[in-house]
């Protein structure tokens, strides 16, 4: 029997492990199963190259819970260890970085990854156990060893009578961690962290229904048998080559990842690269809503099939965090802080690769089946627009396939749009003015007025479209976007010929006074404009610049400080060439003049969707009186 002290100069390492990592103490099971998996895969490699003269067989990892004895057993059929290897790997190597661990993380050691970072994976067991035993037998012809430690630097190491190759770790669960003696808790952790581990993991048994024997009656119960409960899928879809998978396999894997999701994904992107880094995975485009916050944290990050986190910020470009799926890479330094991750060169390359692959997939879909791409546009546009805003390289690629739909559901790329609009919607300064609506119903009258002039109107309604328009206006030459209700059409697209007002300057001054007197409390800025006599007499508009800055402020970033909290701003444009406006000007009765102005204003407000509540009730009542 050997006894001794673990080679660590800081004797209070065990309470520190427990204290610093307490909020993440569930990772002990992940770490111990990862060790068991490594030992099994290493044995597989050694047998394949002839270095280990043993039968590899069909090894598995087994988890047993002894609730009465307050013990958890983790058993593998891997390499095992000799007594000398236990002394080296458990008592010496594992703590070679202990002091660095303490110095670096004494103030903020709450990242579950630091355990693995310093080779402390095995010792995460002490986060839940007051005593840990290792009973292990190497694949080499040497006696088995039995190591015991009670959470202090003192250990015992004796020979054991274990006959089978592999390692059994026994955790004597501490009083403050008895939740881990519940089958349901262990099952939850195995499903969370080890669902796709490459070695089968057994946890208890389950009842399996067998087919009825021939000749059995319908009312006869189907026979059953107890079988091993293997909780994981050792060969998930992302570990296979794309050529091995059909569309149904991808959809089946999506259901495996997200069993509560009933909608099928729109399409998938299979990631598979081994240089200059290793990365595999499958990303799915789900149907997306306009809510940017609800969608995130659906991509699962794995390291060699071990679940690590679903917070992939810094690894996956932010605009793609709304996708779903799996990324697996042994090259991502998961065991350090997020700020380190974001500055890491390998991670940046991985992020760029994923961006490029997504861009290539979208370009391919657009090129090979444009009709299908257009049908999916509304479900994927938020990701593409977000990417165009946040990643310049993605912008360059997406500029060729990003679509701009019209209110009549025709879809154009930007290049196609420019070609279609340039003849009719280029103003006197040679600037192409792209008209758009954000709400087909609310802006219907404005849309119809624009279409009557032969103008095309886009439907741009995503929550970040104001940001994207701003980027397009600064990256393209001689273009501007204007919402159809931002001004009257002749001002939005100014041509050489200007309308001449039928009213003299004096008449306009009188008219403006009359209007201001009647609507002084309504908060509108009045503009008198000479427009076509067939255009509406009163039009309410929202200035493009102020409204867009406000929208950008509300959706995050852009705009001026505090502008998101400003009230809506409206202009009242009065068409001085309309006969109703002339009638208002020439009406001598003050009461009738006020009624005509109020009625005309309310019609304009009704058209804009601004007439509500008591004001709408009064308008209806007044309208009935006028038609009597």
Image (tube, rainbow, N blue to C red):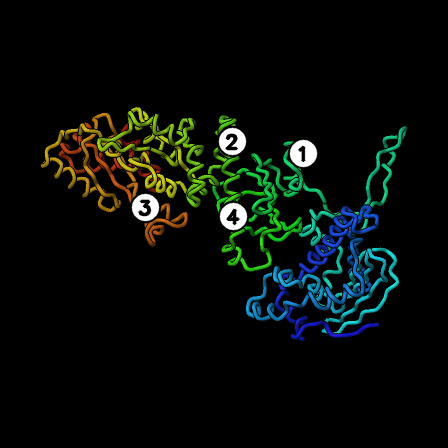
Question: Considering depth in this image, is 431 or 242 the residue closer to the camera?
Answer: 242
Q: Earlier in the sequence, mark 3 or mark 1?
A: 1
Question: Considering depth in this image, is 424 or 545 the residue closer to the camera?
Answer: 424
| Residue found at x 77% / y 72% | 155
Mark 4 falls on what kind of element? helix
Q: Position of residue 435 (x, y in %)?
A: 33, 33
Q: Earlier in the sequence, mark 3 or mark 2?
A: 2
Q: Earlier in the sequence, mark 2 or mark 1?
A: 1
Q: Position of residue 243 (x, y in %)?
A: 65, 33
Pointer 1 residue: 244
* Labelled disc at residue 349: 4
Q: Earlier in the sequence, mark 4 or mark 1?
A: 1
Quote the CA–CA distance across marks 3 and 2. 42 Å
| Residue found at x 61% / y 71% | 99
Image quarter for residue 109? bottom right
Q: Vertically, is 89 above or below 37?
A: below
Question: Considering depth in this image, is 516 or 297 the residue closer to the camera?
Answer: 297
* Labelled disc at residue 364: 2
Mark 3 falls on what kind of element? loop
- Outermost residue on the right side: it is 215
Pointer 3 residue: 568
Q: Give yes or no for contact between labels 3 and 1 (Cβ–Cβ under 8 Å).
A: no
Quote the CA–CA distance across marks 2 and 4. 22 Å
Q: Earlier in the sequence, mark 2 or mark 4?
A: 4
Q: Tell me: 537 left or right of 467.
A: left
Q: Tell me: 105 left or right of 246.
A: left
Q: How dense is the environment of label 4, judged by Cα within 10 Å: few (below 14), some, or many (20 and up)?
A: some
| Residue found at x 29% / y 43% | 545
Q: How dense is the environment of label 2, judged by Cα within 10 Å: few (below 14), some, or many (20 and up)?
A: some
Quote the CA–CA distance across marks 4 and 1. 27 Å
């Amino acid at each position: 029997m050997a006894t001794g002290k673990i080679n660590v100069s800081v004797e209070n390492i065990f309470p520190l492990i427990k204290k610093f990592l307490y909020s993440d103490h569930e990772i002990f099971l992940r770490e111990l199963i990862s060790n068991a998996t490594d030992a099994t895969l290493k044995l597989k490699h050694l047998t394949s190259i002839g270095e280990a003269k043993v039968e590899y067989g069909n090894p598995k990892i087994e988890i047993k819970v002894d609730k009465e004895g307050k013990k958890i057993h983790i058993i593998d059929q891997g390499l095992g260890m000799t007594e000398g290897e236990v002394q080296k790997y458990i008592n010496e190597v594992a703590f070679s970085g202990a002091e660095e661990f303490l110095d670096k993380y004494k103030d903020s050691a709450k990242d579950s990854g630091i355990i693995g970072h310093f080779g402390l994976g095995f010792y995460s067991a002490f986060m839940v156990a007051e005593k840990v035993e290792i009973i292990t037998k190497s694949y080499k012809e040497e006696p088995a060893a039995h190591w015991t430690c009670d959470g202090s630097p003192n250990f015992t190491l004796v020979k054991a009578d274990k006959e089978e190759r592999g390692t059994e770790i026994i955790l004597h669960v501490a009083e403050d961690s008895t939740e881990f003696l519940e089958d349901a808790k262990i099952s939850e952790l195995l499903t969370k962290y080890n669902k796709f581990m490459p070695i089968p993991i057994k946890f208890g048994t389950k009842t399996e229904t067998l087919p009825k024997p021939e000749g059995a009656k319908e009312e006869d119960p189907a026979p059953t048998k107890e079988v091993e409960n293997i909780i994981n899928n050792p060969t998930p879809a992302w570990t296979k080559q794309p050529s091995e998978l059909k569309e149904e396999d991808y959809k089946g894997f999506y259901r495996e990842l997200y069993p509560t999701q009933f909608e099928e994904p729109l399409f998938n992107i299979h990631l598979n690269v081994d240089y200059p880094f290793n990365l595999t995975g499958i990303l799915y485009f789900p149907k997306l809503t306009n809510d940017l916050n609800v969608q995130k944290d659906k991509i699962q990050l794995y390291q060699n099939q071990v679940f690590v986190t679903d917070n992939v910020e810094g690894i996956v470009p932010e605009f793609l965090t709304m996708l779903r799926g799996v990324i697996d890479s042994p090259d991502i330094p998961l065991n350090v802080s997020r700020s380190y991750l974001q500055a890491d060169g390998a991670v940046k390359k991985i992020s760029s690769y994923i961006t490029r692959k997504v861009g290539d997939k979208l370009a391919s879909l657009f090129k090979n089946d444009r009709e299908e791409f257009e049908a999916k546009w509304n479900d994927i546009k938020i990701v593409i627009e977000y990417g165009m805003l946040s990643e310049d390289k993605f912008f360059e690629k997406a500029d060729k396939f990003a679509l701009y739909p019209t209110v009549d559901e025709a879809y154009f790329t930007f290049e196609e749009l420019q070609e279609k609009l340039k003849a009719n919607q280029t103003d006197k300064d040679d600037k192409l003015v792209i008209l758009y609506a954000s709400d087909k119903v609310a802006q219907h009258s404005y849309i119809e007025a624009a279409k009557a002039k032969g103008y095309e109107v886009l439907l741009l309604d995503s929550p970040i479209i104001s940001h994207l328009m701003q980027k397009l206006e600064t990256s393209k030459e001689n273009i501007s976007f204007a919402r159809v209700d931002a001004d009257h059409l002749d001002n939005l697209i100014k041509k050489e010929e200007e309308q001449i007002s039928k009213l003299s300057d004096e008449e306009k001054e009188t008219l403006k006074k009359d209007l201001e007197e009647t609507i002084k409390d309504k908060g509108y800025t009045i503009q008198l404009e000479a427009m076509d006599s067939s255009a509406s007499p009163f039009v309410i508009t929202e200035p493009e610049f102020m409204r867009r800055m406000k929208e950008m402020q509300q959706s995050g970033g852009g705009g001026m400080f505090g502008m998101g909290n400003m009230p809506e701003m409206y202009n009242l444009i009065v068409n001085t060439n309309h006969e109703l406006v002339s009638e208002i000007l020439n009406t001598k009765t003050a009461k009738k003049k006020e009624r005509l102005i109020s009625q005309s204003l309310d019609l304009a407000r009704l058209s804009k969707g601004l007439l509500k509540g008591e004001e709408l009730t009064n308008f209806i009542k007044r309208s009935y009186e006028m038609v009597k």
